[in-house]
Image (tube, rainbow, N blue to C red):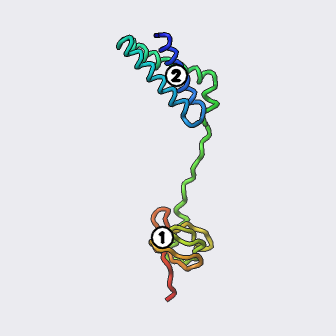
Amino acid sequence: MLPWISVLAILGLVLVFAEMLIPGFGVFGILGIISLLCSTVLAAKMYGTIVFLFMLLSLIVLFFAMLLIAKKSGLYNKVILHDRQEAQDFDESQLAGLIGKIGITQSTLRPFGIAEIDDKSIDVCSLGDFIDRGKKVKVVQISGKTVTVKEWDEE
């Protein structure tokens, strides 16, 4: 029975390793974990704690050995994304001096939308009210990247 337990454990390792390298739903990973659990539980029930601990240690060593082999063979580098997307921070100085300015909404504010202020399209937020497209709005507050506006009455 021990050879079958070992085969089940190695199959589990291979399935978990395949899940790491192949993008997918997770079927390989789930089957691999079930296989590993079954093999270790069977080893513990049939042969006792010593065989269970030996098997657990062997599985851990084999897993890291497989990772090392994958890294040295170049397989690991083929599936790992190395490119980085550089995020550009928002320049809040673009919003300086907008408080008190009048603009026209380019979209309905529900409460977020777009308004044209000083010939620039800016993401804005109303004070909670819906403001229809084409209405005049006044900038009342700037908090970080959030420009808050309210509907402007010319009175």
**Residue neighbourhood size for the residue with mark 2, other residues' Cα within 10 Å, grouped as few (<14), some (14–19), many (≥20):** many
Q: Tag 2, which secondary structure?
A: helix
Distance CA(mark 2)–CA(mark 1): 55 Å
- Estimate the x, y position of residue 95 in percent, counting from the top left: 53, 67
Q: Is residue 41 left or right of residue 81?
A: left
Instruction: In the rendered structure, find residue 72 and report the number of the disc placed on it.
Output: none
Q: Disc 2 marks which residue?
A: 13
Q: Nearer the viewer, residue 93 or 129?
A: 129
Q: Is residue 25 left or right of residue 42?
A: right
- Estimate the x, y position of residue 105 in percent, counting from the top left: 57, 74
Q: Tag 1, which secondary structure?
A: strand
36 lies above or below 3: below
Seen at 50% across and 79% down, the residue is 151
Seen at 49% across and 77% down, the residue is 100
Question: Looking at the picture, which amino acid does disc 1 mark?
Answer: Thr
Seen at 59% across and 30% down, the residue is 21
Q: Nearer the viewer, residue 135 or 28?
A: 28
Q: Nearer the viewer, residue 127 or 88?
A: 127
> In which image quadrant can residue 123 be found?
bottom right
Identify the mark nearer the N-term, 2 or 1: 2
Q: Disc 1 marks which residue?
A: 148
- Estimate the x, y position of residue 85 in percent, counting from the top left: 60, 45
56 lies above or below 108: above
| Extreme residue in the left direction | 49
Q: Nearer the viewer, mark 2 or mark 1?
A: 2
**Residue neighbourhood size for the residue with mark 1, other residues' Cα within 10 Å, grouped as few (<14), some (14–19), many (≥20):** many
- Estimate the x, y position of residue 90 in percent, counting from the top left: 54, 58
Q: Nearer the viewer, residue 140 or 62?
A: 62
Question: Looking at the picture, which amino acid does disc 2 mark?
Answer: Leu
Residues marked 2 and 1 touching at CB (< 8 Å):
no
